[in-house]
Amino acid sequence: MSAPRTLYDKIFDDHVVDRQDDGTCLLYIDRHLVHEVTSPQAFEGLRMAGRKVRHPERTLAVVDHNVPTSPDRVNGIKNEESRIQVEALARNAADFGVEYYSEKDRRQGIVHIIGPEQGFTLPGMTIVCGDSHTSTHGAFGALAHGIGTSEVEHVLATQTLIQKKAKNMLVRVDGQLPDGVTAKDIILAIIGEIGTAGGTGYVIEYAGEAIRSLSMEGRMTVCNMSIEGGARAGLIAPDEITFDYVKDKPRAPTGKAWDMAVDYWKTLKTDEGAHYDKVVVLDAASLPPIVTWGSSPEDVVSVTGTVPDPELIEDENKRNSKKRALEYMGLTAGTKITDIEIDRVFIGSCTNGRIEDLRAVAAVARGKKVNPRVNAMIVPGSGLVKAQAEAEGLDKIFIEAGFDWREPGCSMCLAMNDDRLKPHERCASTSNRNFEGRQGFKGRTHLVSPAMAAAAAIAGHFVDIRDWQ
Ligand SMILES: CC(C)[C@H](C(=O)O)[C@@H](O)C(=O)O
Ligand code: SF4
């Protein structure tokens, strides 16, 4: 009998093309997602070397970061820099025979939302993209991670990637989530617990009753932010919830191939007794809705709490960095989180821009009005999410309540397009990063779940969603 292996070990082993004595491996890559920001030099490199894309049918390109989210984008992108990047991807995809979703295609959306929607993302695969949140696809029991632009070129040319094996970490979330507490709160709590460097050098497997109970949307939210915890990737063993989601997706296998695929996917779980280098355990029942107070995703606090006092931190470097974060955020230690007023709300991103997120927002917003001081936007993660939301009448609820209902893209998650905060504006955001300037120069970001963001939009300040009526 061979030694028991983790899910990560199994997927890694199944893709090794070559292994050197020092542990360096050449991995076969099943799927390559491409967006406009990290691909131009990679295609240019191929062109200069006279190379082709090795497997165009395993490659899918989409524009997301730079596209405006206003409906008039179909008439052309006004911002020069954005237009150039978008046009470059369109041209590269055409020249190299890669399937491409432009801003006019209803399948267009954030790269990590469209992969799963199309059935391009499947269990057991190796999936890469020149984007750190590629970890999202790990929700399907795939080994998925971000790569740099030179690696994008390498994968385009060879469909392989040079990799060293990471260590195994298990994050087990036991028990059941209370009402009002979501996948977003789970992952924020995990990052609060391990810190933004806690996962460095590891691939995290998420397991336990609370993870098993999540929908695919929730699992994607959790895996999405693995990178904020420092991990190379995050994954969850596939199960019936996964197979139900994947079935009948446009690129999913059908007929006999489907049955064979499911038989294989069922083997994709960690063997009993397999070794993890690090184990973290959380209790879902004790988790509150979480709000970040600082400029790092690890700066988490319960909505029932107060802004922490950095003076109490012993380590000098850490104390100074958290003091600076408070200053940047314009907050005072001891302030109740529910007393913090907000100016803007951003609902969207590859963390929380899927249909289930929008349903959660609609449930909170139905029959209510956005606070007149607040500018609140909802940006569906893809054209298909938008169409689904409209088929369910969610757009009417949003518009009636005073939300701005927009076209799909990364939008104000990173302000690489027209959507951005003004200096000192404070935003409740469902995205994944609250770094300084992330949503606009001097903008202040608080990361929360979709329901918490919706409630904040209406109240004008943070509220405990568990008290919402
Ligand atoms: C632009 C891109 C390279 C970047 C990433 O890699 O994550 C972006 O998607 C982000 O979320 O910061
Ligand atoms: S939505 Fe945000 S985190 Fe996701 S890919 Fe776009 S910019 Fe990156």
Image (tube, grey):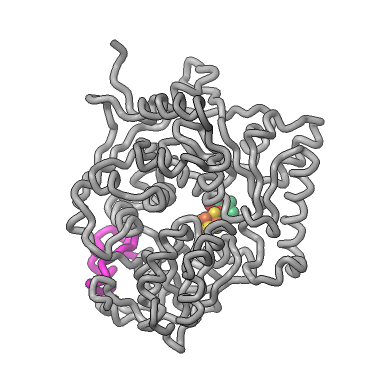
Residue 362 visible here: yes
Position of residue 401 relative to residue 303, above or below, is: below
- Would you say residue 317 sits in the magenta stretch? yes
Residue 324 visible here: no
Position of residue 191 relative to residue 241, above or below, is: below
Q: Nearer the viewer, residue 228 or 388?
A: 388
Residue 96, image quadrant: top right
| Relative horizontal placement of residue 369, taking residue 282 as reference (left or right) | right
Identity of the residue furthest to the bottom in this view: 372
* x 23%, y 75%: residue: 467
Q: Nearer the viewer, residue 24 or 318?
A: 24
Give coordinates of residue 465: x percent, y percent.
28, 72
Q: Quadrant of the N terminus?
A: top left
Give coordinates of residue 10: x percent, y percent.
39, 25
Residue 4, image quadrant: top left
* x 36%, y 78%: residue: 331
* x 52%, y 59%: residue: 385
Give coordinates of residue 348: x percent, y percent.
49, 64
Q: Nearer the viewer, residue 68 or 446?
A: 68
* x 23%, y 25%: residue: 272
| Relative horizontal placement of residue 453, taking residue 308 as reference (left or right) | right
Position of residue 417 relative to residue 62, above or below, is: below
| Relative horizontal placement of residue 185, taking residue 91 as reference (left or right) | left
Q: How many marks?
A: 0
- Would you say residue 360 sits in the magenta stretch? no
Give coordinates of residue 233: x percent, y percent.
43, 40
Q: Quadrant of the C terminus?
A: bottom left
Identity of the residue furthest to the top in this view: 1
The magenta region covers: 298-320
